[in-house]
Amino acid sequence: MTDTLFSREELAEIRSKFYCVDQDMDGSSRLFFDNAGGSLRLKAAEEAFHRADQMPDCSEHSNRTARYLEEVEQAGIKDLLEVVFNARNGVICPGYTASQIMMELVRVISAHAQGTNYVTTMLEHPSAYDAMTYYSQIHGCELRVAGVNKQSGGVDADAVIRLIDRDTAILCCMAASNISGYIYDLETICREARRINPDIFIICDAVQHAPHASLDPEGCGVDAMNFAPYKFFGVRGFGVAYISSRAASLAHHRIFGTPADNWSLGSPAPGHYAAIREIVNYVAGLGAKIAPAGADRRRLFEAGMSRIASHERALLGLALEGSGQAKGLRHIKGLRVPMDGAPLCQRDFIIGIEFDRLSCEQAVREYEKRGVITFERSAESPYSKRMVEAFDSKGMVRVSPLHVHSPEEIERFLLVTEEIAGM
């Protein structure tokens, strides 16, 4: 399959819909290539959030504005469940952060799951890995950890599956790596896990994958899947998860008298649901340009995410191989691209690079001096140590552009990278 860039005209239209695409808050020129840490913001999402959030009314009350806010909230929940997660059953669980939700999911599910061992992978986010570690100790279960494939930058499906047996109570496996962009073969992993143990509970961290591809937890057989809207063009202060009907009915913190599968505590924040609605509108709008007439909202969303992924893979190929204007990362002396063995179709646009003569912290500072924002995944950080050391590294510069970026910006980044590598 040939990956296709957005046309110059459409890319200009797309860029106009986001804040700070090529300028910092003070108007200075920059490339923001740290979208895995928190993506560029969709203007419509921010504006919808503020319109709803400025109203003091509570959506659970009975006045006219409160009823309007209730409609906003319910429309956002419907989009999350049916469009973003493609689910017909189950519930939505909101929270302050995706990490908070992940730890709560592991807490509740581990209290009910039957078995003697848990399985996870070396590349999980600390909110998943540490929760699995903690509750395996609380419940006296063995924790089995699938190791990495140092060439692909991911975890092979077989490495996960061979750890699962009839006594595996929980599998916690992410959708894509936040250090290499490697996309897990979640469908195979889940199918084989349920073949081995039909009663296993499966939890999936989709925070990094959500801005790059469609999600389908119900189709894969996942019991709980989270993501962070602020890493998906949206607003900070909100995390969300899909929970299957089976898992949602497990005893958990809730107000008595509310439904047994209610995972929403306290007064809702309609502004966050208004922002979600606009994110779905935006992606569906991209899909409407190629989808057949009469396609429903989920099909439009899938088509839009497919276009996003195609543009990003084309940019990824350019970043790795270069062009007539700039050498690709694979060909620049003084650096290397570890975890570069997977085909592009198995990767989101997240790259880790190492410089021969600079630490990742030094390199990130050099990039910023030249107007390029990246991020250090350092062994000194509790968020990165386990992952980078799994690849025999002390740290990498993580580069994570978004679909709003242009080939010219990738070339500018490559020229800056060659300059830094030659220091």
Image (spheres, grey):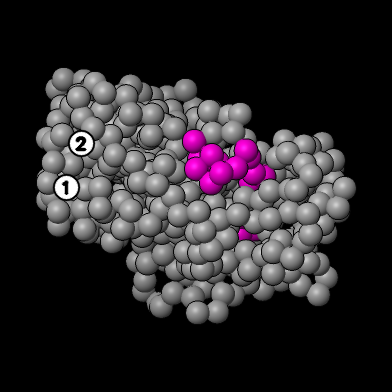
Relative image position of residue 145 (x, y in whole percent): 34, 41
Task: Say which residue appears at 61% left-offset and 29% top-offset.
Answer: 380
Which one is in front, 272 or 106?
106
As drawn, is 124 to the left or to the right of 29? left
Marker count (numbered)? 2
Q: Quadrant of residue 74?
A: top left
As drawn, is 20 to the left or to the right of 382? right
Task: Say which residue appears at 29% left-offset and 39% top-offset.
Answer: 144
Task: Check disc 2: other Cα within 10 Å, few if <14, some if 14-19, many if 20+.
Answer: many
Mark positioned earlier in the residue sequence (2 or 1): 2
Relative image position of residue 110 (x, y in whole percent): 21, 30
Q: Amino acid at mark 2?
A: Asn
Which one is in front, 69 or 190?
190
Instruction: Look at the picture and state if 214 lies above or below 269.
Output: below
Residue bearing the label numbered 2: 117
Give, as a single range, the part of the protein colored magenta.
386-404
Any magenta on residue 44?
no
Residue 20 seen by the camera: no
Instruction: Look at the picture and state if 416 lies above or below 66.
Output: below
Relative image position of residue 399 (x, y in whole percent): 65, 50
Task: Say which residue appears at 74% left-offset and 65% top-offset.
Answer: 331
Task: State yes or no: discs 2 and 1 in contact (Cβ < 8 Å).
Answer: yes
Residue 214 seen by the camera: yes
Residue bearing the label numbered 1: 165
Any magenta on residue 393?
yes
Q: Amino acid at mark 1?
A: Asp
The answer for how far apart the CA atoms under marks 2 and 1 are is 9 Å
Relative image position of residue 416 (x, y in whole percent): 82, 54
The residue tagged with tag 2: helix, strand or loop? strand
